[in-house]
Amino acid sequence: MRRAEFSYELPEELIAQAPLAERSASRLLVVDGAAANWRDGAFRDLPDLLQAGDLLVVNDTRVIPARVFGRKASGGRVELLVERVTGEHTVVGQLRSSKTPRPGTRLDFDGGARAVVQGRCGTGDALFDLQFDAAVMPWLEAHGRMPLPPYIHRDPDAADSARYQTVYGRQPGAVAAPTAGLHFDPPLLAELADRGIEVASVTLHVGAGTFQPVRTEDPRAHRLHAERAEVSPATCAAIAATRARGGRVIAVGTTVVRSLEAAAQGGAVAPFAGETDLFILPGHRFRVVDGLVTNFHLPESSLLMLVCAFGGQETLLAAYRHAVAARYRFFSYGDAMLIWPTPDARGTTA
């Protein structure tokens, strides 16, 4: 297995720089891994593509305004992207400055908060532990900026505070949106409910590591940053009830896939709360997920590898080439896919 096998050519102008006026106005590319084909559609078609008794599982995390700016005591500029709030006064984050801050370095941020660098999280790790003199979450809400992805080449504006969130997000802690959920709006959710399609949730606080490229030539040597995930007893019960009535479990986003598959590592899906660094590559046998709603992903990324594992590498990459030719909009504010798996992707049902 080689990283270059998961590449495709993407013109820069197809990377969406802003959301559409309406969430559910996106296009939808429907990929059937079993038949190795695809067809064009609209996201508003989703209720017609699912069945009464199916279960959508969403990620209810909320993005926090995690990017802040400040200065070292020496006067040099510094930028902090919070990766995770670990306590009332502590965070793990990425620091950008002219020189790498050493342990004990004092940082003065906008809004009057002060932090001291405790050190790196691990040997060679790009993340730092910081101790603040202020309660972190209220300070971020007052002075932080929405952490738009690095491929969106503009500063965040007031609209991003709402549009870089799902309408159902309620658990603050992510520093990147679970973007497959950005297409859902209240009327679409109401129509799904009217059709007998239920919704359950997991929580995975997406970290900035989601944008980190796979740097090893053999992807199997790559390691993901761990992220906090929770699968509740209620969601496990909803999955069991769906199985009992012959319905399908449809994950809304790769974060949901990773959460559910992590919760089923012991065999049956079970309540789970903890760290997961599950890296899904072709050859993985999916225990929980029967269908996947997802956005388009970066070339050679871990997320593209996950969807290739689910829908078939050759089929998915051909569908991506079609999407480029058909001028779909890519990445966080872009269009969506609905993927049905290849027969080989499914393992023992959990």
Image (tube, grey):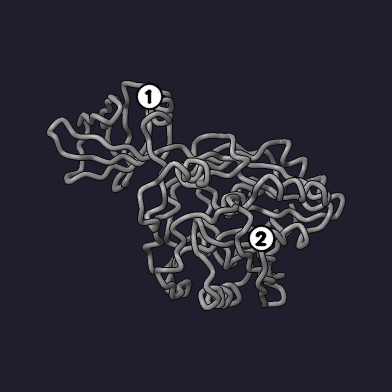
The x and y percentages for residue 248 are 77, 56
Q: Tell me the number on the disc at residue 50.
A: none
Query: Considering the numbered disc 2 on the image, is that residue within a helix, a strand or a loop?
Result: helix
The answer to whether residue 256 is above or below residue 64 is below
Q: Residues within 10 Å of mark 2 (few under 14, many from 20)?
A: many
Residue 7 is left or right of residue 308, and the answer is left
The x and y percentages for residue 124 are 29, 48
Q: Can residue 226 be seen in this snapshot?
A: no
Q: Residues within 10 Å of mark 1 (few under 14, many from 20)?
A: some
Name of the residue lying farthest toward the right: 245
Q: Can residue 264 be seen in this snapshot?
A: yes
Query: Considering the numbered disc 1 on the image, is that residue within a helix, a strand or a loop?
Result: loop
Mark closest to the chain's N terminus, 1 or 2: 2
For disc 1, the marked residue is: 89
Q: Nearer the viewer, residue 178 or 245?
A: 178
Residue 311 is left or right of residue 63, and the answer is right
For disc 2, the marked residue is: 43
Q: CA distance from mark 1 to mark 2?
A: 41 Å
Q: Residue at x 31, y 31 (%)?
A: 130
Q: Residue at x 28, y 24 (%)?
A: 112
Q: Residue at x 21, y 44 (%)?
A: 97
Q: Nearer the viewer, residue 237 or 263?
A: 237
Name of the residue lying farthest toward the left: 74
Q: Residue at x 75, y 56 (%)?
A: 349
Q: Nearer the viewer, mark 1 or mark 2?
A: 2
The x and y percentages for residue 325 are 52, 78
The answer to whether residue 337 is above or below residue 78 is below
The x and y percentages for residue 191 are 77, 50
Total marks in image: 2
